[in-house]
Each structure stands twice: as structure tokens, then as C-alpha cells.
Amino acid sequence: MKPRRKLLTPILLGLVLLVVVLMVVAAQRTGSQFVPPPLPSPNGFDELQRAAQLLAPRTSFYAEMDEAELKRIVTTNQEALRIVRVALRESMAVPVDWTIDPSTGVGVQTRLNAVQNIRSLGRALAAEARLQRNEDPEGAQKTLLEAFELGTTAVQGGLMIDYQFGLAIQLMAVEELKRLVDVHPEIGSTVMRELLELRQNVESAREVTDRERAYIESATTGISGWLMRRNLDALIGSAVEATHAAETRSMAQQSLFIAHLAIRDYQRQYANWPSTLEDVRAGILSNLPIDPYSNQPLLYRVTDDGYQLYSVGENQVDDEGVGDETGLGLDFVYDLTPSEE
């Protein structure tokens, strides 16, 4: 028996070594097989980064400025915004560095700076629209729709962090459009139709999270990379879930906003609130958005003082309009009343 044990030990060690070698080879091959998507040339994203360097330092605080400071900021930002508008007409994709190992954190700050630059440009557009609001409402409308477009196109091809920032820019643009429509309801019809068109260019959360998985799988090699890929769902599962939840919440906000505008447009044209949303589809907007939480029509009813419009929210139960703008627990309620500045 003892000679067999002596023989068994090196055999087992050899098998273990073979398994380790195969794991390393498999891990390295898995990391090298993925081919990153090509970037456009020229890439409008690079121009946006250049534009961000020209912004006035306090641009992001536009909401708390008096008119004199706001004018100075907007004037300073004119060249940056000119570059932004040119870039929005170009092909664009986020230049993800597929060689970075996401487990090390190297390059994270560079990525964060890039997406923060995009957010700052969105705020620069919002600042300009704020200045235009009273004297040039159509100009303000155009500027805010450009901000919304920035939030959809400047993050295409990116990862979850880019996508989340893009959703934030879209929400900021919608909030500013709410304030604009509150003062100038006559532009609501144009805002409604152009938002619908711009929404067609939004990447889905599924596309983004699939790209994130491919990024991790392609960028990680060796034993640690193999282990990371084996535990991929556990490592990024909560982030993926949060990204999909953010997408649904954003789509609900936008769907309700567009539906509100369509209902108000109906009331202006027919001097009555629509009896049902089918009236709105027939008379104003045939492709009225649905509720992203249920994939069913939004909930609507006429009330004594107007109407009620809402989504069923995350629980997918009609709680008769009791809820808030989070969509958590009860209904998702998002109206045209501007939030406090």
C-alpha cells in the first residue's frame, strides 16, 4: 500500500497542476476572444470632452443663480455649446477601454471624469434654456430637447455608469421642460412629439448590461479573472438590477409626461378633458406611450377638478393613484406640476 501512496501523490499533484494550467489557458483565451465594437471616426464624444473643458466653473449651479450671473455663465459657455451642437450631429460612441481590468479599479476615475463632463454639458444647456425661458420659449424648448438628446446619444456604447448618467440628464431635461410648459403651455404639442422621436434613439438597459458583462469577461484574465467570471452574476447582479429599475422608472416619467402633454393638448382643442385615453389616441396622439411597469395603458380618470393619470408602479397594482414619483410600493405619479427649484 505504501508504494501506491507514494505513486498516487505525484499523480494527484500532476492532475492539480494540469487543471490549474487549463484554467489559466481557458481564462486567458476567454479574455482575448472578444472583439470590442469599432468607434466612429471622427467620434463626436471626443468633441464633447473638449467642449466640457471650456465651461465656466459654476455652470452646474445654474438653478441658484440670479439673472446677472446666469447671463455671464451662459455667455461664457457659448463656444462650448456650439461644439456640443456640432457634435450632436456626428456619429458618437463612448470609447470604453476594454483592456482595463475592472477588478483593479484602474481607470475608474478617468471614466468618472468623462461621464461627469457629459453631465456638466447637459447642465450648461439647461442654464441657457433657463435664460431663454421668458423671452424665447421656442429657443428654450429647442435647447432642452438638445439636452435630452445629449442624455441619449452621448452615452451610447458605454457601460452602466454612462447609462445611469444619461438617464439623469434626460430627467433633468424633462424637469426643465415641465417648468417651461407650465409657463408656455402652447409649446406642449411640439415638445410631446419631439420627445417621442428622441426616445427612439435610447439604448435599452439590456444592451448596456450585456455590454458590461462582455467588458468584464474580456478584460479579466488569469486565475482571478476566471474566478471573477465564474461569480459574475453575484458581483454585478445588484448593479444590473438597479440599472433595469432605473430604465423602467425613467420610461415611466417620460411616458407620463408625454401623456400629460397629449391630454392637455386634447383639452385645448376640444374644450373638454378626454373621457378615456382612447379619445387622446384618436384625436391627438395615436402612439401614446404605455405603462412600462405593466406594458398596459397608463391609468386615467376624469375627476371633479380635472383628471388623474398614473402608472401602476413597481408593485403593478392599481392603488387608485396613491403614490409618488419613485414608483416604489404604490403607484407611480408624475404630473406637470414643476418640482421646487
Image (cartoon, rainbow, N blue to C red):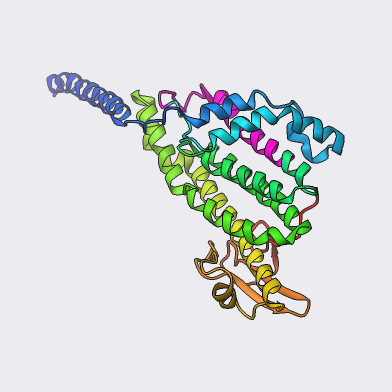
Q: Residue at x 68, y 77 (%)?
A: 270
Task: Give the side of residue 228 with respect to residue 5, left or right.
Answer: right
Q: How many marks?
A: 0
Residue 124, position as x, y percentages in the image: 69, 35
Check residue 210 for magenta coloring: no
Task: Give the side of residue 91 with respect to residue 186, left or right.
Answer: left
- Most common SS among magenta residues: helix
User: Magenta span covers which residues?
Assistant: 98-127
Which quadrant would residue 210 be assigned to in this image? Answer: top left
Q: Is residue 77 visible?
A: yes
> Is 2 drawn above or below residue 179 in the view shown?
above
Query: Closest to the observer: 220 or 276?
Result: 276
Which quadrant would residue 56 be assigned to in this image? Answer: top right
Query: Closest to the observer: 30 or 74?
Result: 74
Task: Give the side of residue 203 with respect to residue 78, left or right.
Answer: left
Q: Residue at x 66, y 64 (%)?
A: 261
